[in-house]
Image (spheres, rainbow, N blue to C red):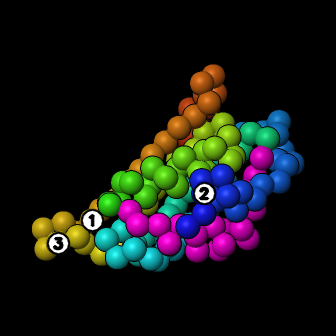
Amino acid sequence: MLEIFERRNLLETEANPGIQFDYVVTLQSELTGAENVFPARLSLRYVPDRLLLKPACLATYFQEIETITFDNLEQAAVLLMEDFNNELVPRWINMRLNKHTADSGTVQHHEATLEDRQPRWHNARLIERLERY
């Protein structure tokens, strides 16, 4: 398992070509690995500031994530959110981790949704127009 900075370095970025615009980038991925957390679908949405995530780097990053032992879905979601937020420093970010299979006969759906934004950034019109999951 890589150290935190080595793991985060797997998230490659590039310059935002439209820094003057507010726009939403959406990425969805399937994660496998630890049985108590994965398989799960990761949905990442963000309004970039200076950087964009290079989607091609996610395969290597997710291979590393799959080697980590998580106690629960929420712990995995927080780690993923911290990594994406730290490397992208987006204007706004929303991440959802949705578990495909139930934890037990009583729980049919399990997901964690996290959101963050830069302190002075606010574009309610853009966020309100987003399709709900």
Residue 119 x, y percent position in the rendering: 60, 24
Residue appearing at x 32%, y 61% in the figure: 71
Under mark 3, the amino acid is Ser
For badge 1, the amino acid type reads His
Can you give x and y, in whole percent of width and height, for residue 87 in the image?
Answer: 68, 47
Q: Is residue 78 shown left or right of residue 93? A: left
What is the residue that sits farthest to the top in this orientation? Answer: 120
Q: Which mark is residue 46?
A: none
The first of marks 3 and 2 along the sequence is 2
SS class of the residue under badge 1?
loop
Q: Earlier in the sequence, mark 1 or mark 3?
A: 3
Looking at the image, is mark 1 or mark 2 earlier in the sequence? Answer: 2
The Cα–Cα distance between marks 1 and 2, rounded to whole angstroms, is 32 Å
- Label placed on residue 3: 2
> In terms of image quadrants, where is residue 111?
bottom left
Contact between labelled residues 2 and 1, with CB atoms less than 8 Å apart: no
Q: Nearer the viewer, residue 106 or 4?
A: 4
Q: Amino acid at mark 2?
A: Glu
Residue 13 at least partly seen: yes
Residue at (45, 50) in percent of width and height: 78
Q: Identify the magenta region.
A: 51-70
- Residue for badge 3: 104
Which of discs 1 and 3 lies nearer the camera? The answer is: 3
